Image (spheres, rainbow, N blue to C red):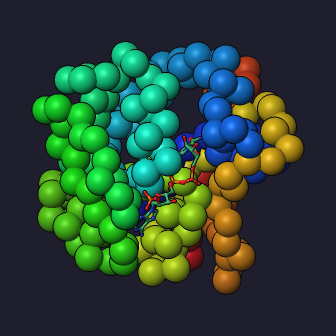
Amino acid sequence: MKTLFFGAASLDGYLADKNNSLDWLFQFGEPKDQYIEKFLDTIGALAMGSTTYQWMCDNLPQFGEGNWPYKVPAFVFTSRELKKYRDADITFVKGDVKPVHEQMMKVANGKDIWIVGGGELVGKFYDANLLDQLIIQIVSVTLGGGPALFPRHTKKPLKLESVKRIDQEFVELIYSVR
Ligand SMILES: NC(=O)c1ccc[n+]([C@@H]2O[C@H](COP(=O)([O-])OP(=O)(O)OC[C@H]3O[C@@H](n4cnc5c(N)ncnc54)[C@H](OP(=O)(O)O)[C@@H]3O)[C@@H](O)[C@H]2O)c1
């Protein structure tokens, strides 16, 4: 049962552009061979920050009312009152990531825990020694700025577990946190 980040980053290390847009990523469409679906099958719970959640609400109308894309319990970090998708298993949480991680472990049914992002939230799990792995799809695009993939100075080097080409535009890097 691992706690991991899985997500795409530009070649220069950003999760979104300076306007929080993901157009640079979605221009390529979904990776082949049910890459995302196979990953989602391994996940028992997920967590994200409110910017990421808000981006989904605002930009993915196909995920609108009743169409929340995830089947597993989702935890959204926010200090505000946010609108909740109807029929979605979403819990709004705030503050320390440790008690939230304990809650996630209880509901994940032995499957992995996905920290969706952004990078600062992934960093909070890393700071608390709760992050086991980073699965990053490096996209063949540079952005010149935006929210950083993983804004931390790693205390020890990450361990490179695998490098794999995915389609024409992505390289998947898997790192474990020692
Ligand atoms: N390329 C990818 O795979 C990928 C993956 C994930 C995200 N993204 C994109 O990257 C961008 C990330 O945005 P972001 O860096 O702003 O990060 P974010 O983590 O999505 O949102 C940050 C916000 O979440 C809330 N929050 C975070 N931790 C909290 C805590 N412990 N307690 C209470 N509230 C907390 C705070 O807002 P409030 O308290 O004001 O609500 C904070 O400003 C988004 O545009 C997203 O769409 C891309």
Displayed quadrant of residue 100 = bottom left
Q: Nearer the viewer, residue 159 or 93?
A: 93
- The picture places residue 34, in percent across and down from the top left corner, at 43, 22
> In the rendering, at what x and y percent does residue 84 appear?
24, 40
Q: Position of residue 59 (x, y in %)?
A: 49, 25
Q: Quadrant of the C terminus?
A: bottom right
Name the quarter where the N terminus is drawn. Answer: bottom left
Is 47 on the left-hand or right-hand side of 108? right
Res. 146 visible in picture: yes
Q: Residue at x 54, y 19 (%)?
A: 30
Relative to 131, residue 48 above or below: above
Quarter-wise, where is residue 106 in the image?
Answer: bottom left
Q: Is residue 98 above or below residue 31?
A: below
Which residue is rendered at x = 80% and y = 47% of the image?
A: 145
Give left or right: position of 10 versus 32: right
- Rendered location of residue 137, percent (x, y): 63, 40
Q: Is residue 87 or residue 139 the one in the foreground?
A: 87
**Which of the pair 93/36 is nearer the observer?**
93
x 37%, y 64%: residue:
79
Residue in the picture at 64% in, 39% down: 20
Q: Is residue 73 left or right of residue 8?
A: left
